[in-house]
């Protein structure tokens, strides 16, 4: 079994207190974790603070870092939990249940990937993304933008695999419908 770059960083950090490896780990994952935190918190300063808190905790507990099986999922889960802590502290936690919304993916004939995306269409998709329910938007971002597997997203968000599938289906359906309407307007 080949050892990934992330695994090597984990070993260097946990067993050798390697600050250079820690900085590399930080920079490798910063962008995706920042986008994820900002999606939750909607505030740049809070997102940055969350990342600082998460990585500070990782450095403090670095001795056990080599025991983590999937560091990327662990990082996303840590950021999610810290975001929820901030939202609760600020009483900003939105109240919604993912399981209340159901969708079927089987009747989708086209996806955004099937369409040649122009700059205008991409801008339209981004507008649609902003209208998705918060959890749906987060799930879609993790799957489509961060390329996480459905199982990893379910683990990060502590939800069922079926919920992830349903929410991605909802997002794809809304995007597909909006793009179809947008193109019919031409």
Image (cartoon, grey):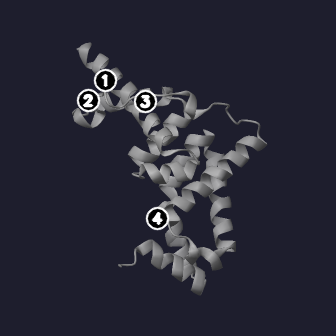
Residue 22 spot, x, y in % from top left: 55, 74
Q: What element does badge 1 sit on?
A: helix
**CA gap, disc 1 to disc 2?**
10 Å
Contact between marks 4 and 3 (CB within 8 A): the answer is no
Which of pointers 1 and 3 lies earlier in the amino acid sequence? Answer: 3
Q: Is residue 69 above or below residue 135?
A: below
Can residue 126 be seen here? The reply is no
Q: Quadrant of residue 106?
A: top left
Q: Quadrant of residue 112?
A: top left
Quadrant location, the N terminus? bottom left
- Numbered circle sitting on residue 144: none
Which of pointers 2 and 3 lies earlier in the amino acid sequence? Answer: 2
- Residue ID at (33%, 32%): 122
Q: What element does badge 2 sit on?
A: loop
Quadrant location, the C terminus? top left
Q: Which residue is mark 3?
A: 170
Can residue 44 be seen here? The reply is yes
The label nearer to you, 4 versus 1, is 1
Residue 158 spot, x, y in % from top left: 59, 48
Furthest-bottom residue in view? 16
Q: Which residue is mark 2?
A: 110
- Residue ID at (36%, 31%): 105
Contact between marks 1 and 2 (CB within 8 A): the answer is yes
Contact between marks 2 and 3 (CB within 8 A): the answer is no
In front of the other: 27 or 104: 104
- Numbered circle sitting on residue 179: 1
Q: What element does badge 3 sit on?
A: helix
Contact between marks 4 and 1 (CB within 8 A): the answer is no
Q: Which residue is mark 4?
A: 28
The label nearer to you, 4 versus 3, is 3
């Amino acid at each position: 079994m080949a050892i990934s770059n992330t695994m090597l960083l984990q070993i260097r950090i946990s067993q050798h207190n390697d600050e250079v490896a820690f900085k590399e780990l930080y920079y490798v994952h910063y962008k995706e974790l920042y986008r994820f935190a900002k999606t939750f918190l909607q505030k740049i300063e809070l997102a940055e603070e969350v990342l600082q808190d998460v990585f500070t905790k990782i450095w403090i507990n670095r001795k056990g870092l080599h025991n983590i099986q999937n560091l990327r999922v662990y990082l996303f889960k840590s950021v999610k939990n810290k975001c929820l802590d901030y939202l609760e502290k600020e009483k900003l936690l939105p109240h919604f249940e993912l399981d209340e919304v159901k969708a079927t993916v089987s009747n989708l004939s086209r996806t955004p990937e099937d369409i040649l995306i122009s700059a205008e269409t991409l801008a339209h998709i981004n507008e649609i993304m902003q209208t998705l329910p918060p959890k749906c938007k987060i799930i879609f971002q993790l799957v489509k933008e961060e390329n996480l597997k459905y199982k990893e997203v379910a683990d990060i968000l502590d939800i069922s695999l079926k919920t992830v599938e349903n929410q991605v289906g909802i997002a794809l359906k809304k995007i597909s419908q909006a793009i179809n309407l947008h193109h019919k307007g031409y």
